[in-house]
Image (tube, rainbow, N blue to C red):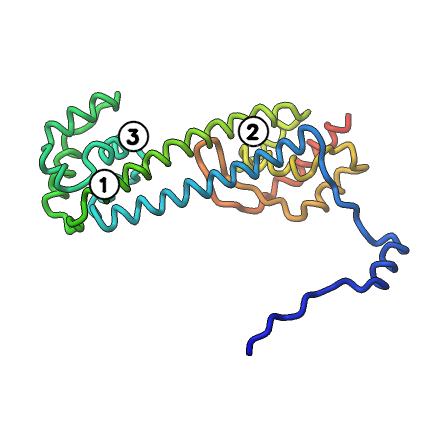
């Protein structure tokens, strides 16, 4: 019989000794704008997870129904690709419409010049597609539901990031963090939300010690990049902390 490992419990004597010696740290619960930033970051993370889940499901749908689609479009989230998925989601519908009709539909939405070569490539891909064809009615309904969800969460995500900008600008000298190479909205908002009011620190080094290695993410409102360690961040954070105390 498999038994669960015993739960680790704190020794009351050990706790008493730590308190007696002052070897503990009080939990910091931020107020006002800093708590707002924490809540905003948490909500953005939730929305990001939803968008990632939808993205994976759409990719899976294409792999099954129209695997050649991704050879014509670099990403399905582009404006032309999304329009195509809404109007001509299957190889059969692409073939039925033909390149002239597809191109005409594209030009009603996409303002920039859309080449005939892409429309021809899409039709050619549809003709040679190895995608599954049975059960297409319910499958198309599933895709349209996914695209509707994508629109909803993307709109919520954009509004949330706009709110994050508005909240971030309410923190004195917060814009200094955005001048660090590789630091975007998400990193700056997360850092300030976790650090809280810097006036509770006596020296800038306390902030650096609290956060350890300065992890930064190459990010913006529309791009989520790789998280790395910044070599410039420590000095910039120190400058931000110093000026924040002025």
Q: Which residue is at the front of the view, 125 or 112?
A: 125
Q: SS class of the residue under badge 2?
A: helix
Disc 1: which residue = 140
Point 36% across, 43% down: residue: 55
Which numbered dot is residue 29? Answer: none
Q: In which quarter of the image is the N terminus?
A: bottom right
Front tag of 3 and 1: 1
Query: Nearer the N terminus, badge 3 or badge 2?
Result: 3
Q: Residues within 10 Å of mark 3 (few under 14, many from 20)?
A: few
Q: In this view, does 177 lie to the left or right of 58?
A: right
Q: Is residue 75 left or right of residue 101?
A: right
Q: SS class of the residue under badge 3?
A: helix
Disc 2: which residue = 164
Point 90% across, 55% down: residue: 20
Disc 3: which residue = 79
Front tag of 1 and 2: 1
Query: Nearer the N terminus, badge 3 or badge 1?
Result: 3
């Amino acid at each position: 019989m498999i038994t669960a490992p015993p739960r680790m419990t704190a020794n009351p004597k050990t706790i008493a000794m730590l308190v007696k010696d002052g070897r503990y740290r009080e939990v910091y619960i931020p107020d006002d704008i800093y708590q707002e930033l924490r809540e905003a970051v948490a909500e953005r993370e939730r929305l990001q997870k939803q968008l990632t889940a939808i993205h994976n499901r759409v990719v899976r749908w294409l792999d099954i129904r129209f695997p050649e689609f991704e050879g014509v479009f670099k990403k399905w989230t582009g404006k032309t690709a999304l329009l195509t998925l809404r109007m001509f989601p299957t190889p059969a519908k692409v073939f039925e419409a033909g390149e002239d009709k597809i191109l005409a539909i594209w030009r009603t939405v996409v303002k920039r010049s859309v080449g005939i070569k892409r429309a021809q490539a899409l039709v050619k891909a549809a003709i040679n597609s190895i995608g599954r064809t049975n059960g297409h009615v319910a499958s198309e309904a599933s895709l349209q539901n996914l695209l509707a969800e994508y629109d909803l969460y993307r709109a919520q995500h954009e509004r949330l990031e706009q709110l994050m900008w508005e909240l971030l600008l309410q923190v004195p000298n917060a814009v200094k963090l955005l001048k660090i190479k590789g630091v975007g909205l998400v990193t700056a908002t997360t850092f300030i939300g976790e650090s809280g009011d810097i006036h509770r620190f006596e020296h800038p080094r306390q902030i650096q010690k609290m956060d350890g290695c300065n992890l930064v993410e190459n990010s913006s409102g529309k791009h989520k990049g790789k998280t790395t360690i910044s070599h410039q961040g420590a000095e910039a954070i120190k400058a931000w902390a110093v000026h924040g105390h002025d």
